[in-house]
Amino acid sequence: MKGGGAADRLLSCLSNPIRLNIVRALIKEPAISFTDLMRRLGLDVKADTGRFGYHLRMLRDEGIVNLNSAKKYELTELGRRVADLILTLEDAAGSARSLIVRTSRLQMEPFNRSKIAEALEREAGVPRRLAVDIAREAEERILRLNVKYLTAPLIRELVNVILIERGLEDYRHSLTRLGLPVHDISELFKAASKSSCPSFLYRRASEAVLAEYVLLKVLPRRVADAHLSGDIHVCDLPGWPLRLSSIHHDLRAWIKAGWLQKDAKLSKILRLLFRLMSSFETHVGVDQGLAFFNVMISPFAAGLTYEELREELRFLLDELHWSYVSKRYLPPTSSLTLELSIPKHVASLDLPNGRTLGDYEAEARMVLESLLDVLREGPSMGGVFSSPQVIVSLRSLHPAEEVEELLLKAHRVSAAYGVPTFVNLTAGWQGVEACYSAFFSRLGSDWKGDWELDTLRVGCLGEVVINIPRLAYEAAGSDELFMEGLRDLVEVAVDAFKTKRDSLIEGLSQGLLPLFSFPLEDGQYLRLDSCSFNLTLVGLPEAVKFHVGEYPHESRSASAFAIKLLRALESQLASLSDETGLRLQPSLSPSEDPSSRLAQADAKKFGKSKLVFQGSKERPYYTSIHSSSRLMPIQLYERAKLEGMLHPIAHGGHVMLLGVGDVTGEALLELTRNLFEGYGVGSLIYDKALTYCSSCRQVLNGIKARCSSCGASGFSVIHLGRHSPVYKPSQLWSSEERDSIIHAYRYEL
Ligand SMILES: [Zn+2]
């Protein structure tokens, strides 16, 4: 019984508390000197040396402990197996077993150390031996804490601390828990109750977790770091892996797909259309656009009276508005693009009924006119339409008389309510076709050279905003450093775009975006190859002011620098497009406004005294969308000149958001002609600040505390304004939005 004799000897060697404790100490500290080991055991280095040396020798004689070349004691292979045995025995006797853990699956379980080791292996790929070792250490610490009631998150955090202490941070990234502090959720409850919108709470809470996940696991580290530090802002983080920013739909494809019936009545078509747009909401983060809306639905409008048509269209607009308002103005929103007359390249498009769209010119015009009436009347629930964004494409500024009437009508509605908005397709640089979204990102017909392939069933996949004031602070006056900084951040952003494209391709192939991957004769619904990525600059006026000493509108050299910046961005994106195959576009119109987050990050980094900003020292923000601050009383045509120079370069997105006071439609039409013809402005919003009185249902010009029509005040009076292209009521304005809306300079014509 040779084996039996060896086991007897081992057990007898271990049947002494000092020797057992030596083995335990060596589990925790794999290599340790004689005196350190004594101290670890609580022995007196002078008085106990002889006794300790005796026990250590016995362990060495049994081959459990070994003295290594560095004169440190360590466990031998046999020693490690003995140690495992000791730990197993201790587990079986189980002091830790009496602890109960509340798990993340909302169950109660007895504590089990091996679950920690399994999680380390499974979730973070920690090697087995290391995982077991960390689990043991975690167990010891838990026992020392002397808690009666453990939760799984607490254990996880404890393990994370051990990982950090051991310098194993990469494992921690995989093992960490994503979630919100209790306080943040309490705040979300408060915000939800203020707006009477519980779905706001659910969505914000779940998206916060997804955003953390994207920063930790989806985006390359340098992208996540640049976002968190405030160099850039990755828009729609929670949707980064699986959502498009925007899409321009093609209703003809919906008919071909069988989603809309070609011979249905308009009422049914519009109901289906709304339902489909609701279904698409899971696929889109910011905006769904219906391009050529009045032209596309004109065949269904044939035979309807003007009144019938208006009622049908009211249904769609009311639904789109309500679905946006009821989501507490959280995107996605929607947009409808309208044509004054059918452009040639659209008129020749075939319809499933054997005719062409051009056959319905009169109907298209009637749809446009009825829609303008619905816009003028406002939503049935009162106020002004926030969604859809209604955009009128102008292809001629001096059209025939009957079209001229409609153009004037559109401007009259816009003069009163700030909607519809206008796009200038008369400018040469716009090419054959250009589609704009609700937030004025743009797709032209210059990618594959076929306007249909370039603009329809195509969208903006994602957007990254660059904090250019920070580049200015860091460049300290050097053009070269400024441009170098910009080039570096563009490369970071393109890294982010690549992950998004890959992730969307995977999502499409896995059937996670079934409406986009829906097969049609010419391929899937979404034309992924033509989709764009936008690189958007915010804080242009502030960056130029810091760098050159003047705002872009103040001098020729300042505006020249703004142009130089955008040109540099444009040409770098063009060459990166060639290199990567991605449709990369420079833009000035962000779909999500990070300007206060970025300004506040800069205030922390550089100190408030260095910053050029808008707003207050407590709540600084940068200018977004505008190339000169909207707060300054700048000569209108100085402003227009600058926008007109920048829009063609920022062809991925731009809009002139022009504050106006009490104006007439006639004056606005004249102004539109001037801005489009004389200055080449690409797109235009006449921005109004409005007061809606819920007592008498009037919309009044300007921000008023009391209704000038019926005298109501307090809760009956709601203010409406825009910091971005979309209206929001005052109870949802952030402090910078309030500042920008209240103090915006508004032109009286
Ligand atoms: Zn009133």
Image (cartoon, grey):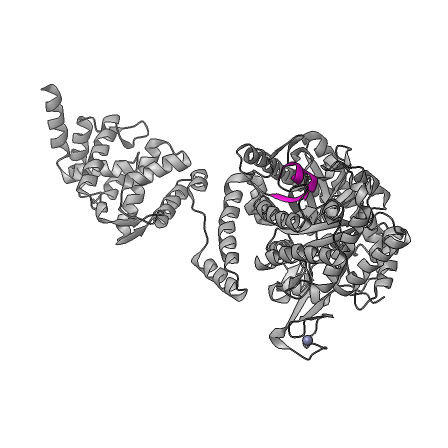
Q: Is residue 663 left or right of residue 87?
A: right
For image coordinates 85% across by 49% down, the residue present is: 680
Residue 296 horizontal/vertical position (percent): 73, 44
Asked if 370 appears above or below 236 in the picture, the reply is: below
Q: Quadrant of the C terminus?
A: bottom right
Q: Position of residue 533 (x, y in %)?
A: 67, 40
* Image quadrant in which you'd find residue 692: bottom right
Q: Is residue 560 visible?
A: no
| Between 188 and 403, the one nearer to me in the picture | 403
Taking 323 as reference, is 716 above or below it?
A: below
Whether 62 is among the magenta residues is no
Relative to the observer, which residue lies in front, 542 or 289? 289
Most extreme residue toward the bottom is 711
Q: Tell me, yes or no, whether the highlighted magenta stretch contains residue 253.
A: yes
Q: Percent from the top left, x then y, of residue 522?
A: 67, 30
Q: Quadrant of the N terminus?
A: top left
Which residue is nearer to you in this view: 13 or 394?
394
In x, y percent, where is residue 71?
30, 30
Residue 428 or residue 593, whichever sits in front: 428
Q: Which residues are magenta?
A: 244-258
Asked which quadrant contains residue 97, the reply is: top left
Q: Is residue 735 left or right of residue 364?
A: left
Q: Please tell me in which quadrant of the rendered image residue 442 appears.
A: top right
